[in-house]
Image (tube, rainbow, N blue to C red):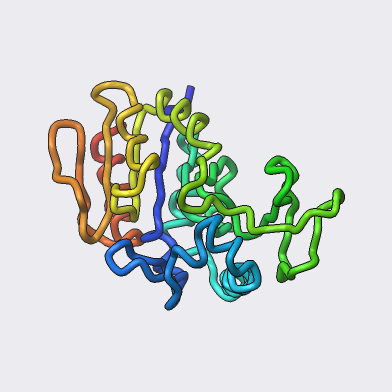
Amino acid sequence: MKKHLVILTGAGISAESGIKTFRDADGLWEGHDVMDVATPEGFERNPELVLNFYNQRRRQLFEVNPNQAHIDLANFESDYKVSIITQNVDDLHERAGSTHVIHLHGELLKVRSTFDTNDILEWKNDVLLGDVCKKGHQLRPHIVWFGEDVPMIDHAMRICETADILIIIGTSMQVYPAAGLMHYVPANTPIFYIDPKPALSSRQNLTVIAEIATIGVSKLKDLIKKRAI
């Protein structure tokens, strides 16, 4: 039976593909205040601004490709059962070949009804004011905004509880509830944390690799092979 490799990824892995991210320090995302483009209140104030912002992010997806880190993670599936829990809203893990990806914060290539949160549609084009669900309600990005519940978090917790190895890549470990997922893995589970500016230090079962994702995952492959885990 294959060991279960659980991988938690953040903005750092997609940044190497050219996807810009916002940083909590300045609260800006592509020059916009995140409170204007990533909150229910912002959408209520200016829905057109918010729709246009995500339309640009969606268009950008078609101009970028998975990087070697995404590909290496997908290749782990030949030797492990792999579950990827990502905070990213892009589809780069799927395009790299990963087959079990949980998106904690939603997906750019989906939209949902503003009336029924379970009415979710695949969507690759721009979303405009006047684009409505089958019941006539405006469509919005299928993105978890600040102040909203994270519907997939319980599922992610259950996955972490079954991990044989946990890998954390490209995340500051400051955004909750995602940052708390590492505490749900079984005791003494080997944990590897890859980030150029790691927020954690190596200790006991935690190994820190202070590298960007592409280099860090390459080093990780060697470490796992060397330790035969």
The residue at 36%/27% (across/down) is 164
The residue at 41%/42% (across/down) is 7
Examine the image and state in which quarter residue 166 appears. top left
Q: Is residue 92 above or below residue 49?
A: above
Looking at the picture, how far across and down is residue 90, in whole percent?
55, 59
Looking at the picture, how far across and down is residue 97, in whole percent?
58, 52
Left or right: 74, with 109 as reference point: left
Left or right: 44, with 215 as reference point: right
Looking at the picture, how far across and down is residue 65, in whole percent?
54, 68
Q: Which residue in the rendered view is the most extreme toward the front?
A: 45
Which residue is at the front of the view, 52 or 215? 52
**How many labels, in total?**
0
The residue at 14%/45% (across/down) is 201
Left or right: 102, with 52 as reference point: left
The residue at 29%/33% (across/down) is 228
Examine the image and state in which quarter residue 4 appears. top left
Which residue is at the front of the view, 87 or 192? 87
Looking at the picture, how far across and down is residue 44, in whole percent?
60, 61
Q: Quadrant of the C terminus?
A: top left
